[in-house]
Image: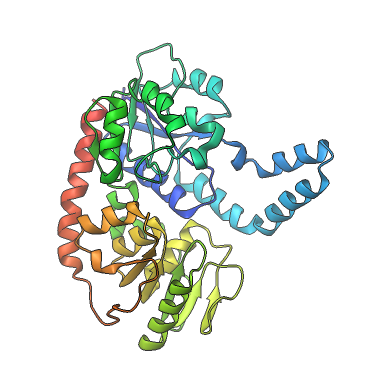
Amino acid sequence: MNKKVGILTFIWSMNYGAKLQALALQSVISSLGFDCELISYKRKEDCRISESLRHLQNGQLKRAARGLMLETFNWQRNLRFNNFTSQNIKMSPKICFDLNDLAALSDRYDAIICGSDQVWNPELTRESQLSYLLDFPNKRDLRRIAYAPSLGNDTLDEKWHDTFKRCLRKFDSISVREKSSRGFISSLADKEIASVLDPTLLLSKEQWVEYSKDIEIKEPYLLVYSFGISPGLRKLTEQIAKNKGLKIVTFHKQRHYKNELKRFPNAGPSEFLGLFEKADFVITNSFHGTAFSIILQKPFYSVINIRGARLKDLLKELGLEDRLIINDETKQVKHDEMINYVRVEEKLSVLRNKSIKYLITALK
């Protein structure tokens, strides 16, 4: 009988990167011969309607209305995310909401992997942080493994140090996504820490295209995938679009650029992949926006602030530091410089093999 593996990550987040990294990690582990499923763990943030109803019961009418309006507006996007999950991702039979639920479900697995994504960033996980540190009792032998979790930064707020130290020392194997945080995590865990790729980068361009949906856009376009829009990002987008004669396509709800052609605020994961696949250029400030630009071999720029360690580490390893723009410094951008993706793919192949070797060893 194949060993059974559970993955604990942000599976119910309506975020493209979160959903696709979960799919990728499950796909790779299954290909190694393990019976792998995503643990259906729901944080409070993943239960907006029930939270809105709770506000309503407490007489907090404005908060309840705001939550329900947002959920209603996003219904089409949520439906696409849920359909993508049901069609492509194997889920655990039981939904978990807390540590007790996870403890009961853990008896089903030989190993549980936490990661990837920012599951070790307490600013995001809040009261769910202990769950993502696998801080629950278990009745049977259980391997605790971390695959490419991110802190979101290089270090943690000091108030979390003791908690992380206690939990991490129970892990059998730990890897992280950012090299810049490896030394800090090692000091807390008191063990060697591996550096591995984000799961999305473990699958090839051809594998990702199988999950994409063709979006009919007749004109060549520059795709913008960003969280917020800085003045530098807007300026760079409009400069490159004008220079290359491209229309602008975004995921935003509202119009932000002069030469916008279409907006896709309700795109699901398959539409997200389709828009990246057909783009002629990409501007992003997102880690996964950068990752999919690389995977699908697109010309791109990543615009980040000085704290963007996640992107710096990845681009440095792949020899793509020139695609990074820090703090809106757009003066020296070379609009016509091509990316040598043959060389990038060679480096990516080495890193993929190293990351998969880590998984094989950790799951033994």
Residue most extreme to the right: 59
Q: Is residue 67 above or below residue 167?
A: below
Residue 206 place in picture, x, y as percent: 29, 59
For image coordinates 39% across by 56% down, the residue present is 288
Residue 158 in which image quadrant? top left
Extreme residue in the front direction: 158
Residue at the spot 21% in from the left edge and 48% down from the top edge: 352
The quarter of the picture where residue 108 lies is top left
Q: What is the x, y in percent for residue 89?
A: 45, 43
> Which quarter of the image is occupied by the C terminus?
top left
The N terminus, quarter of image? top left
**81 shown above or below 225:** above
* Residue 4 in picture, x, y percent from top left: 36, 26
Seen in the image, is 361 located left or right of residue 259? left
Q: Residue 343 at x, y = what percent? A: 15, 64
Chosen colour scheme = rainbow
- The number of callouts visible is 0
Extreme residue toward the top, this view: 139
User: Is residue 185 something one can see in this rendering?
Assistant: yes
State the image quarter where residue 59 is shown.
top right
Residue at left offset 30%, top offset 26%:
189
Picture residue at 42% right of the left edge, 43% below the top = 118
Work out whether residue 217 can be spotted.
Answer: no
